[in-house]
């Protein structure tokens, strides 16, 4: 009798584990857009070198640098908080700006 109860418990535990993936799905990437900007030649060279240094892309470096800037600039964040009432920029989420219509 005890063997049967243990077998039932083991089956329940295996079923619960069956609902969990061994390899988790990658996080969903936020939607990306293309922007164009003019920068000094030396800035572009440093951007490319930094991307190479961290084994990434210039787009990633720009995105991360802007996220750091937006997060650390207290004066900007105070100003941004005042601007959110006009409905154009709703919130700063996930380190990026979320634009609303």
Image (cartoon, rainbow, N blue to C red):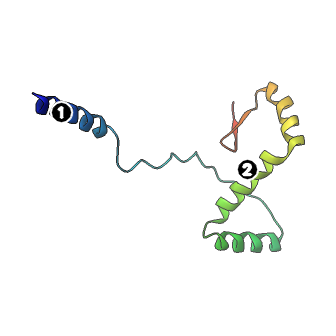
Tell me which numbered mark, 2 or 1, is placed earlier along the sequence. Answer: 1
59 displayed left or right of 68 = left
Residue drawn at (23%, 32%), measured in percent from left and top? 12
Near mark 2 (Cα within 10 A), the count class, few <14, some 14-19 or many ≥20, is some
Look at the numbered discs 2 and 1 and tell me whether their residues touch, using CB distance below 8 Å: no
State the image quarter where residue 81 is shown.
top right
State the image quarter where residue 98 is shown.
top right
49 displayed left or right of 1 = right
State the image quarter where residue 85 is shown.
top right
14 displayed left or right of 40 = left
Q: Nearer the viewer, residue 66 or 42?
A: 66
Is 37 placed above or below 92 here?
below
Residue drawn at (81%, 65%), measured in percent from left and top? 39
Residue 29 in the image, given as x and y percentages of width and height: 54, 48
Screen quadrant of the N terminus: top left
Q: Nearer the viewer, residue 3 or 83?
A: 3
Near mark 1 (Cα within 10 A), the count class, few <14, some 14-19 or many ≥20, is few
76 displayed left or right of 71 = right
Gap in Å between the C-alphas at discs 2 and 1? Answer: 53 Å
Residue drawn at (66%, 60%), measured in percent from left and top? 59
Residue drawn at (71%, 74%), measured in percent from left and top? 49
Residue 24 in the image, given as x and y percentages of width and height: 41, 48
Residue under numbered circle 1? 6
Residue under numbered circle 2? 67
């Amino acid at each position: 009798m005890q063997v049967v109860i243990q077998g039932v418990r083991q089956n329940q535990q295996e079923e619960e584990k069956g609902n969990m993936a061994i390899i988790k799905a990658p996080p969903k990437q936020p939607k990306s857009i293309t922007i164009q900007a003019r920068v000094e030649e030396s800035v572009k060279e440093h951007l490319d070198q930094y991307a190479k240094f961290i084994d990434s892309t210039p787009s990633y470096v720009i995105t991360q640098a802007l996220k750091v800037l937006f997060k650390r600039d207290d004066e900007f964040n105070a100003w941004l908080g005042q601007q959110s009432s006009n409905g154009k920029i709703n919130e700063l989420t996930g380190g990026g700006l979320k634009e609303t219509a």
